[in-house]
Image: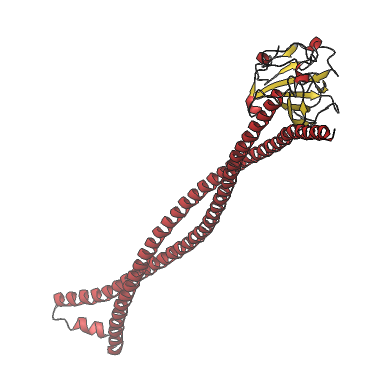
Amino acid sequence: MRKLVLKLLILLVALVVIIQVPVSMAASTSSLENQKEANQDKIDENKQKKEEITAEKNQTVQEVEEITNQISNYENQIAELDTKINTLNAEISENEKKIEEKQAEYDEQQELLEKRLVASYEAGETSYLDFLLSSDGIIDFISNYFLVTEIATTDAELLDSIEKQKQEIEEAKTNLENDKKELDTSKAEKQSVAVELQETKSAKNAKVQELTEDEQAIQKEIDELAEANKSLDAEILRKQQQIQAQLQAQANKGNSSSGSTSTGGGAVSNSGFIYPVPSAYAKITTGLYYSSGQYHGGVDFGSGGINGQPVYAVQEGVVVTAKALNYSYGNHVIIAHPNGLYTLYAHGQAGSIRVSEGQYVSRGQQIMNVGSTGNSTGPHLHFEVRKSPGTYSNRVNPIPYLP
């Protein structure tokens, strides 16, 4: 009797272990999928940030190029002003030299004139008359008179000419100095602008460097997340293979025989599926594509009166997701099946989910009730079939798998 009890206990423990292994694996797989989706969301978010940073960096680089062109333009103008200033300095120096020469010439002529005037004054007012009267004849008198007149006129004209040239040179020098001052002022202004532009350019270059570092940091995070997702994919695949192996082992041992005879969803298809709703409501109201041509990804069962009707597992398997959302699929369940397929049941009534993640379910077992939660416009069951690994991108047409 004790041996029989011991055998029964051993068998019971073995059954619990066999059932619990896929249960824990399913829950673990669901967690890995969630982590992968979170990583992918972060990757997408980072890619968007990187695009924004790259666009900002490109704009800043363009601004730096424009500033560089402005700086180059100002530097060219400053160089031209330097050339003009040097030319003006040379002209000013030359004019100063001319002024000195003219001043010396003027001083010399002035001195000679003063000496003649002094000599004339000392000789008395009759000196010119005596000079003329001492002429030998009329011709000599006229010649002497002409000579005296020319000397006086020439002295006066020479002094006027020298004074005029001196004034002209002074004016030219003043004009040149004024031009030089204007050029110096213009040069100083342009140098000031060039310095400001250079400071702006340095700030812009620093910004480009900062953006480049941000860009590199985000790319590094993207690469790390992508690498992490590769590892998660490998881990998910390994666990899914284990789940399928355990499900197949259970099927071989007859653990799902009670589910396989269920008629909850009516007839059984060649794929081993039944309808996910009672036969009376097993009419597809929306196919794989909407009437607009947009991809639907699944089919809808939405006959009149379907609200509150039971939703069945179309085949035995392990629940990998059982969630209640107020958006998207709303209350939904995802089941992994022994044939490598996954099925999704969505928009169930609030609070109607009867299974949990990791739970083994039989074909025809009720998992929830038809409702209109999440992104739904009325009571219906949204049903999907997915190939391994059971993600959103692995959806296929459910119709060939149904009875």
Tell me what residue is drawn at x 40 percent, y 67 percent: 171
| Rendered view: 77 above or below 18 | below
Q: Does 377 sit left or right of 233 as displayed?
A: right
Residue ranking furthest to the bottom: 122
In this view, the residue in front, 47 or 367, is 367
Q: Does 16 sit left or right of 242 as displayed?
A: right
Q: Position of residue 185 (x, y in %)?
A: 48, 63
Image quarter of residue 59: top right
Q: Position of residue 62 (x, y in %)?
A: 51, 46
Image quarter of residue 285: top right
Instruction: Judge whether residue 334 can be spotted in this image.
Output: yes
Image quarter of residue 300: top right
In this view, the residue in front, 189 or 128, is 189
In this view, the residue in front, 140 or 343, is 343
Q: Does 83 sit left or right of 16 as displayed?
A: left
Instruction: Judge whether residue 378 can be spotted in this image.
Output: no
Q: Position of residue 178 (x, y in %)?
A: 44, 65
Q: Quadrant of the N terminus?
A: top right
| Rendered view: 53 above or below 396 | below
| Rendered view: 331 above or below 188 | above
Tell me what residue is drawn at x 13 percent, y 81 percent: 136
Q: In this figure, what is the number of numbered marks?
A: 0
In this view, the residue in front, 47 or 256, is 256
| Rendered view: 167 above or below 207 | below
Q: Position of residue 55 (x, y in %)?
A: 56, 42
* Structure colour scheme: secondary structure
Q: Quadrant of the C terminus?
A: top right
